[in-house]
Amino acid sequence: MVFSKSLTAEEFNPEIIMNSGQVFRMKKETAGADGMPDTYSACSGDNDVYFYLNKEKDTWDFACEESQWDFWCRYFDFDTDYTSYNNIIRKSDDKFLKDSLKDAFGMRILRQDLWEVFISYVISQNNNIPKIKKSIQILCDRYSDGIHFPKADVLAFIPEAELMDGTALGYRADYIKGISERVAAGMLDIEAISKLPYADAMEALLKIKGVGPKVANCIMLYGFHFMESYPIDTWMKKIISEDYKDYNTKDAYLDYINSEYPGFQGYVQQLQFYHKRKG
DNA sequence: CGCCAGGGACAAC
DNA sequence: GTTGTCCATGGC
């Protein structure tokens, strides 16, 4: 079944979203040969979708099972009005952020599968994006069908030595095995944590071995969709020191972000991150 | 506190 | 081609 949705360039651009560092397995499937449009794919949990820009109708067309369409609307966060965030940014006098918005037109914060986000961001620590993608794909190939992310009760029973061999996971394999075991045994309920208030969810995440402040913030934003989360990695540190010199401390800078962009700090971060990485 | 862990990307030489 | 640096977290 194909579902059409009218979305402006400002409202949806998969090229921006898939290269923003928030999702590691959204793909461009075809290069648009023979006049065919570029087709993208995503999967989340047991759901799959293909989508492309329909130039005749000027819509984005999403091909998925009829029963999954509601799921995909939620995944792409179509209920959130990003244009209203953009209007606030456009009215601000933050040149770096306004440049970021122009560069990252069509950004959204996805509502991804909690389990996949959790493990993906444990993998992301002390790591770079190409290598993170590689490790995740190897896990999908080896311990699932190559498309869907392996379940906790599968990963829990893989010997650590095997989990390290040829996956480039390194010492993170131990964290992944530990977390998988606890989830599979029902001792760790990620879904329940995601429903806690912000401070409680953050506290619960930081207790988990392999999850520090940076990884916790990423899970809070990309997994739990706490839009007030503002993950700070090395790129963001670079931005703060190079592009926001007026703020002499990190806290002063964060006060500025929190007061000017309440409720969509994570979206602001995503725009800045994309812009800085693109250079 | 400082150091190490595993390993690929990336820049500099 | 080879070398050096980067990277989040936990354990010691």
Image (cartoon, coloured by chain):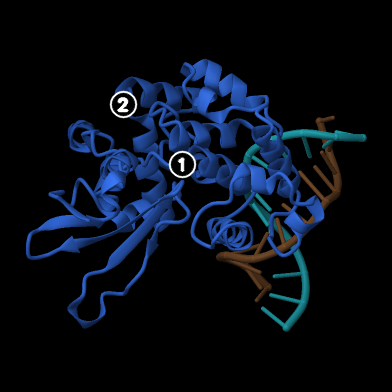
Chain colours: A blue, B brown, C cyan
Q: In this view, does A10 lie above or below A178?
A: below
Give the label, 2 or 1, closer to the camera. Answer: 1
Residue A205 visible, this orientation: yes
Who's the residue at 55% across and 23% down the image?
Answer: A202
Residue at mark 2: A261
Q: Decide if residue A251 is on the left or right side of residue A70.
A: right
Residue at mark 1: A113
Please state the chain letter of the residue tagged with numbered disc 2 in the rendered image: A
Q: What residue type is labelled 2?
A: Tyr
Q: Earlier in the sequence, mark 2 or mark 1?
A: 1
Where's residue A117, x and y in %?
51, 42
Question: Which of these two is toward me, A222 or A112?
Answer: A112
Where's residue A181, x and y in %?
71, 38
Badge 2: few (under 14), some or many (20 or more) residues near its Cα, within 10 Å?
some
What secondary structure is marked by label 1? loop
Please tell me in which quadrant of the rendered image residue A239 appears.
top left
Badge 1: few (under 14), some or many (20 or more) residues near its Cα, within 10 Å?
some
Question: Which of these two is toward me, A65 or A219?
Answer: A65
Who's the residue at 19% across and 61% down the image?
Answer: A53
Q: Decide if residue A254 is on the left or right side of residue A99.
A: right
Q: What residue type is labelled 1?
A: Asp
What secondary structure is marked by label 2? loop
Q: Is residue A156 above or below residue C5?
A: above
